Image: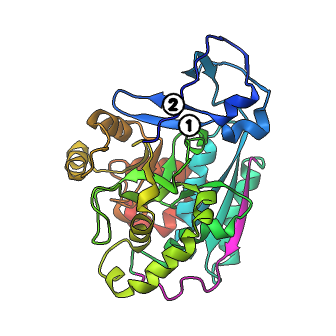
Amino acid sequence: MHVKKKIESNIKGPFYFREEFFERSFSIKTQNSSYYYSLEILKPIYCFGMIRSFSKSENLFGVKFNFKNSKIIIPIAMSLDDRYTYPIIVAITSIMENSYSNTRYIFHIMHPSEFSIKNKKKIQSLEKKYNNRCTIYFIDMKEQYKNAKTVRYLTTPAYYRLSLPNLFHNLDKILYLDCDILAFSDLKEMYIIDMENYYYKGFLETNIDAFHPNNTLYICSGVLLINLEELRKDDMVNQMHKFMKDNDEELKKIPFHDQAIINAVCYNKIGILPAKMGIFNFKNIERLDIFYKKIRHKYKYSYEEFKLAFLNPFILHFTTIKPWSKGNGGQCKIWWVYAQKTDYYQEILNKYKEACK
């Protein structure tokens, strides 16, 4: 992993950042891993501004850096069709319920043209519910990817994430989240992770396909931090589309096409997020152990980090069992807790009543 020059400081308490501090990064280290965070994202808001310390803070450079009290706007992209209306409502609900009061989210929801107005209104009602601390925009993707290979668990909207760099020319960075997630913390900590010289960072996966170069990182495409600026600079959207066209038949033979494309085309600038940011909803510790042993990379998570992420996730990704289709056992129970916090709980119960038995 690229190592930034460390900044030393003996200053305690309230602290005014000078301009040059924003050209550097800070790191948060666990026993076996280091994740690098960039202060650049705070520059427009806190250049020469004061960061006040409080109880939930990180001791960085001898300074109490405060995630909670720093204001920020976080853009999030998601994609769906009508079938995922309720899961996305539950996902956004979890984000808003666990967000800090001064973090604002802008959700960009990509959908096919036939997505219903009724479901748009249901999703958009979350703006009023959370006192306009979030803004929700819908993006009609029209005929894009209409000829891409789809299966029961992989629909056309799964491919929309490939187009994000060309959809948001005014953004340098964005989070992408699948609809089958829950967030248990404010997403600021994830958003400010340093992305210099990376296209994507995600949760380290085991499902290495035939396209994947040896000895390179392979990540899940369902929870991503994306460097839009870097992808645009290297014209990676066109390269991914060309890869799709050139490997159409071969892609049909593997399960997760969008994920395969990202990992195959962008392999030289792929990084990993902390395990807690995208950990899967394993049925139990035994299943977690089986998955962990299958991860084949020298930079794999430590087992301690992996297990702690499972017990105390930042973002939980429901890849193994969908709470609305396979019941409410194990970690699926928590999804139903957040479903109850929505204004559509009874509708959700009625729609997925078989799963609730």
**Disc 2 to disc 1, C-alpha distance:** 6 Å
Q: Amino acid at mark 2?
A: Ser
> Could you tell me residue 16's position as x and y percent?
75, 21
Q: Which residue is mark 2?
A: 27
**Frontmost residue, 35 versus 306:** 35
* Residue at image location 59% in from the left, 83% down from the top: 144
Q: Amino acid at mark 1?
A: Tyr
In the rendered image, residue 102 lying in the magenta stretch gets the answer no
Q: Are marks 2 and 1 in contact (CB under 8 Å)?
A: yes
Q: Secondary structure at mark 2?
A: strand
Please tell me whether residue 2 is drawn above or below residue 156 in the rendered image.
Answer: above
Residues in magenta, as a range: 133-150
In this rendering, does residue 20 appear at all? yes
User: Any mark on residue 37, and which?
Assistant: 1
**Frontmost residue, 40 versus 203:** 40
Q: For mark 2, does the 10 Å Cα neighbourhood hold few (<14), some (14 to 19), or many (20 or more) residues? A: some
Please tell me whether residue 277 is drawn above or below residue 304 in the rendered image.
Answer: below
Which label's residue is closer to the chain start, 2 or 1? Answer: 2
> Could you tell me residue 293's position as x and y percent?
20, 48
